Amino acid sequence: MSSLSDRRVRFDTASLLAAGVILCVVVALATTAFLPDRYVFNTPSLAIQFGFLAILGVRYSLGFAHNMAGDIALGIVSVTSAWLLIAVAHSYPGDATTGFWALVVALWLSFWLFVERLAAWSLPNPTLARLVNLAIPVLFGATFLILWELGVTGAGVPRVLLPAPSEIWIRLTTSVPTLWADFQQTFLKAVLIGYAIGCGSAFVVAILVDRVPFLRRGLLPIGNLVSALPIIGVAPIMVMWFGFDWPSKAAVVIIMTFFPMLVNTVSGLAETDAMQRDLMRTYASNYWQTLFKLRLPMAMPFIFNALKINSTLALIGAIVAEFFGTPIVGMGFRISTEVGRMNVDMVWAEIAVAALAGSLFYGFVALLERAVTFWHPSMRAKM
């Protein structure tokens, strides 16, 4: 009964999205797309492509295309339509009118429908199912970039306010040496070294806090106080203490990552219940045997939670710290400098590199968590 209800909801959503695609394409064909009086019909390839998209929309609205072949056809037509519309928009930057924006909405709805259909696939092969699950967020991100490109180009947004993704990509590909040097300075030195020292030292102190009860009462309140300190107040002090190079940024990262790791590890070590501890005592286990055999494994979800949180905090802390003094290299230095020069595409290129590095770092920690805590119910549910 539940599965029938789910199918009905999916069918209704697909029909509504398909009807939206049809309506938007009809509006686009009936109105001008670009100033002064250029219609979609003036570009035959664009009219034919979106005509195909409307035909697929009709099939979905009538329930005839609810199969993998129809879904794949929808994806191919949506991608080629987006490619053609971007090419035409670059020929008329800033001249978009009602018809163009109707096509943009039609593309958005068609990609939404495609992702909706992908999520409804039931694949017997686990590998294919995993690939489809990975494709869904990739398609979501690609749709966002396509809409960004079309919106900025069609509206003629000045480059200094918001560059198009294509301009950012050109800057990325033409500034690889500079971006690599900044990445080495910020991520490979300040972030990784500060992250390792901050998380590692916090783990050791958490064991001491667990072993010595009075430290729990004295140190944890101080930890809450220090974790609330603003980074813009701490960073200049670290620069004065450790100089302008990466050690001062690593010190900021250590401060930012130390207490989340400490608090989570202490909470994880207290996760075992009285029955489990009594069982270890019946085996004549001492403190260290209980710690390594029982309490640390139970604390691993908490520890990895802190490691994942710190993977993003470390990068943010290092970049912000570079605003307050650094050699002529580093992501934060480049962002602050290029903003002053109005080179916003370079700023977005640095942001893209930082976002990619942070995401990969977080993903690595998440994969490591899955390998270490495969026994935990939350991990079994994801497999």
Image (spheres, helix red, strand yellow):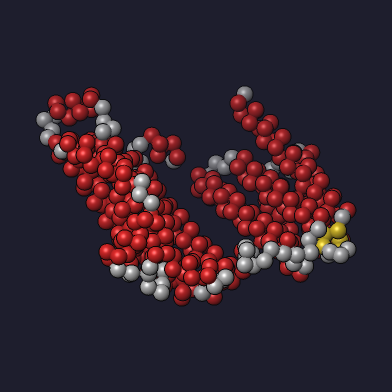
Q: Is residue 312 visible?
A: yes
Vertically, is 348 above or below 217? below
Across the whole image, how many numbered discs are drawn on residues? 0
Comparing 371 with 33, the one in front is: 33
Residue 366 placement (x, y as % from top left): 40, 48
Residue pictured at 80% horizontal, 46% vertical = 22
- Quadrant of the drawing holding the N terminus: top right
Residue pictured at 67% horizontal, 56% vertical = 147
Residue 280 placement (x, y as % from top left): 17, 30
Vertically, is 41 above or below 25? below
Q: Is residue 80 visible?
A: no
Residue pictured at 38% horizontal, 61% vertical = 321
Q: Residue 130 vs residue 35: left or right?
A: left
Residue 314 placement (x, y as % from top left): 37, 55
Residue 297 placement (x, y as % from top left): 27, 39
Q: Residue 381 vs residue 136: left or right?
A: left
Q: Residue 104 vs residue 324: left or right?
A: right
Q: Residue 31 vs residue 49: left or right?
A: right
Vertically, is 286 above or below 43? above
- Quadrant of the drawing holding the C terminus: top left
Residue pictured at 74% horizontal, 38% vertical = 15
